[in-house]
Amino acid sequence: MGFDMDSKYELGRQIPFREAAYLDDRQWDEWLALFSTDCEYWVPSWLTEEVLSTDPQKEIAHIYYASRAGLEDRIVRIRSGRSPATTPLRRTTHILGSVLVIEQGAHAMKLRSSWSCHVFEQRHKKTTTLFGHAEYTLSLQGDDWRIRTKKTILQNDYLPSMVDIYCI
């Protein structure tokens, strides 16, 4: 099934919204399907007040997966119920702001979205808000867009608990 160019690009622009809904609804398989097998998923850390880490292979990162296999492994651990970091699993609500198209070509797009996520931790009976922006590189695979790279810039200065894939 082919798409006209406007429809094709609109489907790409919907990826951050679909991702947020899948995470909030714990639709792990649908969330994983958004990513290409050779994707890179990275949440760099702040080295100083002004400088982010630039190389996940050499510097500390909040989260780094070099392929979808790492994301799949994380989902297995979340589903197992044996991950102390995710038991009980926190409830989340993602709120997306602007989704800007930075570049678009026939088979690729770059997007930037601003976001916040309200995270309720049952164990501590508290809600935390995480916020930042995400940079996506999408590739068209058949008629579907897939996330090739996702880099999430977490703007919080203080993280009261660990950060996981479902709360950013």
Image: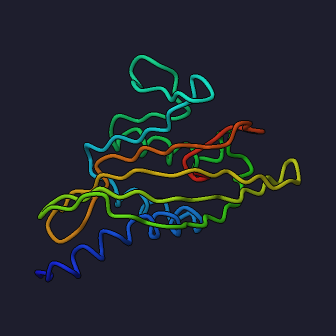
In this image, 146 relative to 127: left or right?
Answer: left
Question: Residue 48 falls in which quadrant of the image?
Answer: top right
Question: Residue 1 falls in which quadrant of the image?
Answer: bottom left
Question: At 32% across and 63% down in the image, what residue appears?
Answer: 101
- Camera-side residue: 48 or 13? 48
Q: Is residue 12 above or below residue 113?
A: below
Q: Is residue 43 above or below residue 168?
A: above
Question: At 50% across and 33% down in the image, what residue appears?
Answer: 44
Question: At 36% across and 53% down in the image, what residue appears?
Answer: 136
Q: How many marks?
A: 0
Q: Is residue 5 above or below residue 155?
A: below
- Camera-side residue: 51 or 53? 51
- How far across and down, in percent of the image, does residue 154 sit? 58, 43
In this image, 34 relative to 133: left or right?
Answer: left
- How far across and down, in percent of the image, does residue 91 sit? 71, 60
Question: At 41% across and 26% down in the image, what residue appears?
Answer: 54
- How far across and down, in percent of the image, does residue 138 sit? 27, 56
Q: Residue furthest top?
A: 58
- Camera-side residue: 74 or 6? 6
- How far across and down, in percent of the image, does residue 106 sit? 11, 64
